[in-house]
Image: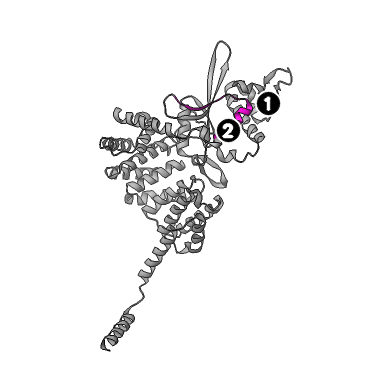
Amino acid sequence: TYFVVNKLSMSGLSGHTRRHNPRRSAEECARMLTSRIVNAQSDGALADFVEQHVGKFDEIHVSTAANKLAKLTARRHTITLSKSQRDSVLLLLEERLHDFESISARPVANLLWSCAKLGYDDGNHSMVHYLSDQVPRVVDDFNPQTLANTVWAWATMRHQPSADSLAALERRVLACVDDFKPQNLANTLWAIAMLINSIEGDSITCRPTRRVMRLWGTTAIDQNVLDQLLHRLEHAAQLRSLEEQAFQQILQAHHLLGDRFKPSAALLDRSCKAWEKSLLSSQTLSQSSFGKEVAACLDRLGVKYELDVVTEDGMHRIDILVRTTAGDNTQQQQHMLAIACDGPEHFMRSCYDTYHIDGSTFARNYELSDLGFDVLCIAVHKWRMLKTDDERDNYMRSELLKFWCRIFGCFLLCLSEMTCDNTEEVCDTNTGEIWFDPRYLKYGYV
């Protein structure tokens, strides 16, 4: 009896003295919110949860939700929302973000990474500009991973950070470069090379002329940053701690940066082999249904072409190459049109559902242009809007005419706006002289 009474009295005492702990309840609530976000099985389930509970989110929840949305969107079987519905989720998170007086370092980097992974460019949401402007304030709390994520996001979205944000990031990279893991070093180097390579032109069929820098006015990346990254990468290569992807990034950075980034002969040779291996193992156009449709269109137009052509420097495989010869019998010049069949991974989506090529694709176009190619990007989202063979043929004919107009002179400019079948001749209405016969398309020249 004593034991039972004593137990009851102890239980009663315990119940009497136990008090509500607001802090503990808040922590439990925060953990519950995080758990529900992380365990969402689809973007639709996540969207419903965000809509119901976003008012309870702190900055970590906002960051985690955006990160989870990006990962769910990357898996086809977990996508249930349209692009506009995902936009609405991100807008709710952005609105919640502005309720906080400040935001710490990790959410800044994670949110920028999420925006880039979701395929947004910096014109889609003010969130990108807002987060980038926070970098000078929080950069001293960045670790190597958040540094790499931030500069990668900027490069991928082709975002132009302020001079203050860039200088702050450079300073932090130099301060903790010895703490970088090998892959962080390679990722950061690659992203910086993409940023430096950022040049004028935003169209999907971007055809850069020469390197026209638009990096932060007259500000460029501190050479010391590149030197320190190279030094650490050389050391990592000697320790054999670099993965294949890192070697590929080193070679691409070398091509983009030129004399500003010159690896040793040993590191350059290893990087070339890794790049060649990657190029040989990558999907060819003949394996792509999208590429086959584009090639079939050229067949209908009678255009001669070559498939899966590797450039002389071994850096790129061109999906479709169209060679055109201009000039008379005494002096002829060959012009090369590189047609890239670009899937969704090559594009960032901005406001009003317009698309722009991402930083990596922009760099590819620049390098091909520097090698003497004209570049025509056939965007998969645009191609899928053309439902019939006639629509696709007219689109392709128009793009090819724009290319040939630049070669053969302005008298063909009128043709770029024309749609004609394969038997129609275009003549000077005064003299009757034939300017252009679309049947000549099959010979690869005008």
Q: Nearer the viewer, residue 248 or 75?
A: 75
- Taking the magenta stretch, the answer to whether it contains residue 305 is yes
Q: Which of 385 and 61 is in front in this view?
A: 385
Q: Which quarter of the figure is the C terminus placed in?
A: top right
Q: Where is residue 118 in the image (x, y as percent from the top left)?
A: 48, 48
Q: Position of residue 365 (x, y in %)?
A: 48, 32
Q: Which of 77 and 193 is in front in this view?
A: 77
Q: Nearer the viewer, residue 266 or 261?
A: 266
- Helix, strand or loop at label 2? It is helix
Give the residue type at disc 1: Asn
Q: Position of residue 197 (x, y in %)?
A: 43, 34
The residue at the point 67 percent across, 34 percent down is: 390
Camera sees residue 159: no
Pointer 2: what residue? 294
| Disc on the earlier residue, 1 or 2 | 2
- Taking the magenta stretch, the answer to whether it contains residue 372 is no
The residue at the point 64 percent across, 24 percent down is: 412
- Helix, strand or loop at label 1? It is loop
Camera sees residue 443: yes
